[in-house]
Amino acid sequence: MPNDAPVSSELPDYVSRFTSSGSPLLRLTGDLERWGTLFRQVLRSKDAAAAEQVLGGLVEWMGNDLIDGWLQLAIPLFEEVSDLSEELFRACESYLAWARQASTPNPDEARLRHEERLHEVLERVRALAERG
């Protein structure tokens, strides 16, 4: 599934608005938004190996930056962010597994299902950031 299209480093305005804030919640949700966006862009334009590296970065983030958020957020709020990060990981993992085999009868339809799942998780991340 290689493609030479450039990966855009631009993110939606609301992501930069949230991450410019000093709020731990907005920083963490902004990070999740970036990881999900980057994963989707890389898997669309590169190959599965490149997307796997992004997924590894998400896992590292979950083990470091996310855990640091535990000290800065109320426990219920931290659990929400943590649950969303796990959902994002699972959605990316499933999409990556599909991309590795991509021999389904309707590849466009299958890709769309994975894209929709990623979109749903990222919408919930945005909603949490806005609700803050």
Image (cartoon, helix red, strand yellow):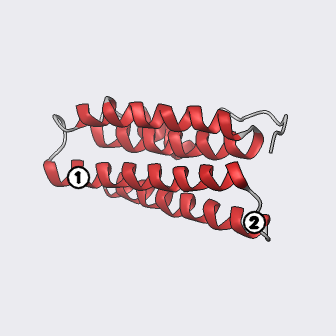
Q: Which amino acid does label 2 sit on?
A: Thr
What crowding class fits label 1: few (fewer than 14 Cα within 10 Å), some (14-19), or many (20 or more)?
few
Judge by depth and name the residue closer to the eye, 93 or 26.
93
Residue 15 at what x, y percent from top left? 50, 42
Instruction: Determine which of the numbered discs, if any, sits on residue 104 in the image.
Output: 2
Kindly report which numbered mark, 1 or 2, lies closer to the viewer in this rendering. Answer: 2
What crowding class fits label 2: few (fewer than 14 Cα within 10 Å), some (14-19), or many (20 or more)?
few
Residue 109 at what x, y percent from top left? 74, 70
Q: Can residue 15 be seen here?
A: yes
Label 1, secondary structure: give it.
helix
Where is residue 53, by image quadrant? top right
Residue 115 at what x, y percent from top left? 63, 60
Mark 2 or mark 1, which is nearer the start of the sequence? 1
Where is residue 43, by image quadrant? top right
Q: What residue type is labelled 1?
A: Glu
In the picture of the structure, the residue carrying the numbered disc 1 is 79
Judge by depth and name the residue closer to the eye, 26 or 109.
109
